[in-house]
Amino acid sequence: MSKDPYLYQFEYPIRIADCPTDPPKDVHEKDLEDITKDLAKELGKLNNVFMAEKKHSILVVLQGMDASGKDGAVENVFHYCTPANIRTYSFKKPTEVEFAHDFLWRVHQQCPAKGEIGVFIRSHYEDVLIQRVHGWIDEKRVKDRMDAINAFERLLEFDNNTLIFKFFLNISYEQQEIELKQREAERDKMWKHNPGDWKERERWSDYMRCYEDVLNNSAIPWTIVPVDKRWYRDYVITKTIVDKLSTLSMEYPGLPKGL
């Protein structure tokens, strides 16, 4: 298979400082506008067969700093998919009940069944990111949790035929400031404003260090998505999912036997 000329090729180990946040210089929005729309429509068609066949489940993990465009990605990438088949969930501070269990207990309950697409807008990786950045867990616990996450994701793969897509939404420090200021100034974005986002921004270098560890120590590799231009984000995510689903040779099931 030839390489996509619109996509970057990343090599491990990943160093986030070397990863672009903008599209390739010779790629412009007009180049990808129609292609991305066609890909989104194709994803809608593939989703219908996927939903009817019920042989696989899909888990999409979106991780990135505040204002990296997680909500917008869901809206645009799955625009032509049957809404009833897309289930999104965002992991926030655990409740008392969740704290009383292991850290993956609440995650397993939100995983998609066969025929479903589950999207984690922030995910189980929060437990080795924000908790590590703030020093709420020690380094041994971080390693143990990463081992548990890798085992958990492999379980989903082999025991439920789950296709796991993990996207790191790579926003620049400068673009994040622009996005956060827009939330304070633009009426239709004010509902997203959270003063705590500015406090977390002060820990940017710590977050990048922790994200780097996650990217380099995950058994299932991540797709690094430059998101300073949202149209390029949509292309990369949609293209990645469509390419994988197109290899499954899915088909609509016939009538049940005996009918």
Image (cartoon, rainbow, N blue to C red):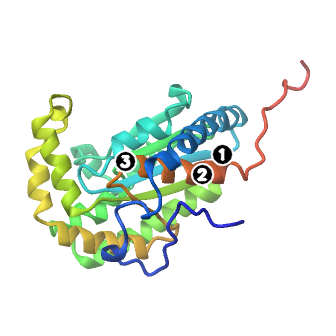
Q: The residue under label 3 is which amino acid type? A: Arg
The residue tagged 2 is: 162
| Residue ID at (47%, 62%) | 26
| Residue ID at (29%, 52%) | 68
Q: Is residue 62 above or below residue 8?
A: above
**N-terminal label among 3 and 1:** 1
The residue tagged 1 is: 56
Q: CA distance from mark 3 to mark 2?
A: 27 Å
User: Disc 2 vs disc 1: Cβ atoms closer than 8 Å?
Assistant: yes
Q: Position of residue 190 (x, y in %)?
A: 15, 33
Numbered disc 1: secondary structure: loop
Q: CA distance from mark 3 to mark 1?
A: 29 Å
Numbered disc 2: secondary structure: strand
The residue tagged 3 is: 230
Numbered disc 3: secondary structure: helix
| Residue ID at (35%, 60%) | 125
Rendering quarter of residue 139: bottom left
